[in-house]
Image (cartoon, helix red, strand yellow):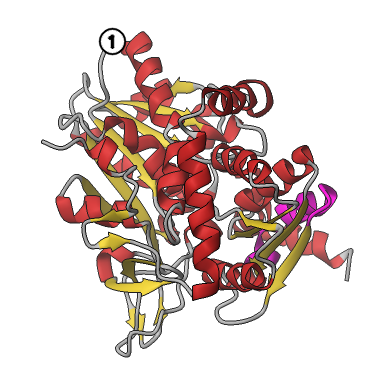
Amino acid sequence: MTSLKHYLLNGSGHFGLYGGRYLPELLIPIMEDLEKAFYAAIDDHKFLEELENLYSNYSGRPTPLTFCENLTRKLGGAKIFLKNEGLNHTGAHKINHCLGQALLAKRLGKKRIIAETGAGQHGLASATVAAKFGMECTVYMGAKDYDRQRPNVFWMERLGAKVVAVEEGGQILRDAISAALRDLISNPLDTHYLLGTVCGPHPYPVMNTFFQKIIGIEVREQLKKQEGKLPDYLVACVGGGSNAMGLFHDFLDDPEVKMIAVEAGGKGIHSKGSRFDHAARFQEGEVGVVEGFKSYFLQDANGQIGETQSISAGLDYSGVGPQLAYLKDLGRIEAYFALDTEIMEAYQMLAEQEGIFAAMESTHALVEVIKLAPKLKKDQIIVFNCSGRGDKDLFITTQHFDKKRFNAFLQQFT
């Protein structure tokens, strides 16, 4: 059998029906240059040493693999382990690919970084590496996300980044990506588009998978030391899919390890024309070509991309990474969804049981863990990726748990 680990890093950028590079002619040379630089860099031991040094001495890797003893006891069944990517510098897994791409941008002689962001974690990591490497930075953010993830907007601005609230469309992640691509077309020579997930045209899915696979590599080593065995289940939330591919990749050739991707179920799996009450592409999505790649997208009857809904800005996206689409068709991963109404209960349970605040995105994975663990044997192991920490969601969680005081606080500034 062909190695899935190798296949999903292939040089063509195609994964079965999915992937590819569907772009305006002006952008093709930029992507070709980036592709050449990437494959040359990952064969260069000096590049890899510099990246490893940044991971260890700037980002703070390895991140802990924490046994959730209290949560395991409460739920019964399988042992639950949490890979705490929220303890990375900037508070999420996004710094992994941002450091890798920043090094590539430096190799290519770029002076400016642009990025899109939903939850703000990728934007924050992009602004951080731009400051670290002395580059100008512009971050595009849907106006809806700009408001609900205000803490990260504040930090990006402190780092010297220009944060642009995108007013077009649904004012979410999809619209931020479109704005960033327009910027790249206008500024092709000095600008690197630091795309923030395993979506987009080749080489982005492969490139970001390569930089994120450190998550699964560490999990394998850490769990071997702690338990002496492989996990039975890996669980990760999926928007574009960078944290999921990061967790899954190193275990793709271990068939005994089951993998679960959890999407945003929003208000329920319903649609009204071009408006969806969720962002569950594997539930109601169809194959299409959008923003430079082929994958599953939520579309209306005319093939137009739908507006999505999720309590989590980072999962509020109409498409999914092409590698994950391929793995789902292949049956290598299972896909489920978590509803907005389930998220806060899971968030509170983790906080009370383990003293960890998970990001709204990561809490989608936790919802599935809470359902799954009691069904399994006590000697089985679940690892879920806590892809980010929850302080960024202060406005969302405060409105839910302490709305009266939150509104009183806001009135001081109006």
Residue 83 point in image, percent of width and height: 45, 29
Please state if 157 lies on the left or on the right of 199 as rendered.
right
For the magenta stretch, what is the residue range? 145-161
Q: Which residue is drawn at 81% across and 47% down?
A: 159
Q: Quadrant of the N terminus?
A: top left
Residue 273 point in image, percent of width and height: 36, 88
Residue 272 point in image, percent of width and height: 36, 86
Q: Is residue 178 above or below residue 76?
A: below
Is residue 346 shown to the viewer in this render? no
Which quarter of the figure has residue 224? top left
Disc 1 crowd, CA 10 A, few/some/many (<14, 14-19, 20+): few
Q: Is residue 9 magenta?
A: no
Residue where numbered disc 1 is placed: 228
Is residue 265 shown to the viewer in this render? yes
Q: In this view, does 119 lie above or below 56?
A: below
Amino acid beneath label 1: Gly
| SS at circle 1 | loop
Which quarter of the figure has residue 303? bottom left
Q: Is residue 334 above or below residue 233?
A: below
Most foreground residue, 85 or 164: 164
Q: Residue at x 41, y 79 (%)?
A: 305
